[in-house]
Image: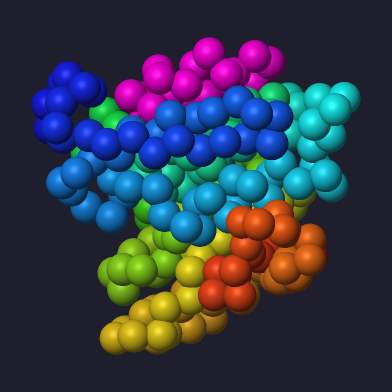
Amino acid sequence: MAADEESEDYFVREIEKNNGSVLRMYQCSKGDVGCVVWDAAIVLSKYLETQQFYNVESDASTWSAKTIIELGAGTGLVGLVAATLGANVTVTDLEDLQHLLRLNIRKNQGLIRTGSITAKVLKWGENVEDFLPHPHYILMADCIYYEQSVEPLAETLKLLAGPETHIMCCYEQRTVGVNPEIEKRFFELLLQDFQSEEVPLEKQDSEFSSPDIHLLHLRRKAI
């Protein structure tokens, strides 16, 4: 991947926030699934801006000073939106996505006033000590697609989430190939330790939502 962000290796997608500011998200023209902005990331990002969490007129935000970890961040869109709303965010992904994450943080830093954002490597299923204490929120968009990652992802969520941690999981339901079995296996594992509640479409952004994209709130089950 070329270091020059103006090269042909990148193309930009502009995402307008509810306050009129615009995030410029660099995507890779070549690479794995984490190199582009997926629809579920947009749905989750816009959900963070809905009136139940953020008042665009007063700038009052539920996310102000909250600690957030985004898993499988890819381009970093969801974490960046949270940071612009005042959260202190750590966006995580594998080593080969760090350059893209850092590029998008640098290109959109001017929109972050009271929040903060840092990119770090986190491989699911491995030690999470560097990410503790438990965050207020864990965000994840379209992370359920590789069969071999189902168990490590569930394990990472168990390690990262404390009793007060809220997990927001957004994913596009895919009905082809092995996708239904992967989703089924993931939630079988996760619901052993977590309780889940689906966010109805009427509580999501009226424009950026879809029946095919599910948004869940997850919390640890009381012991």
Look at 76% across and 46% down and name the residue there.
50
Name the image quarter holding residue 216. bottom right
Q: Is residue 106 magenta?
A: yes
Residue 108: image x %, image y %?
47, 21
Q: Is residue 7 visible?
A: yes
**In the depicted structure, whether residue 64 falls above or below residue 146:** above
Q: How many marks?
A: 0
Look at 68% across and 50% down and name the residue there.
47
Position of residue 47 in the picture relative to residue 125 (left or right): right
Quadrant containing the N terminus in the rendered view: top left
Look at 69% across and 44% down and name the residue there.
48
Look at 18% across and 48% down and name the residue there.
31
The color scheme shown is: rainbow
Residue 6: image x %, image y %?
21, 22
Residue 137: image x %, image y %?
66, 44
Q: Is residue 113 magenta?
A: yes
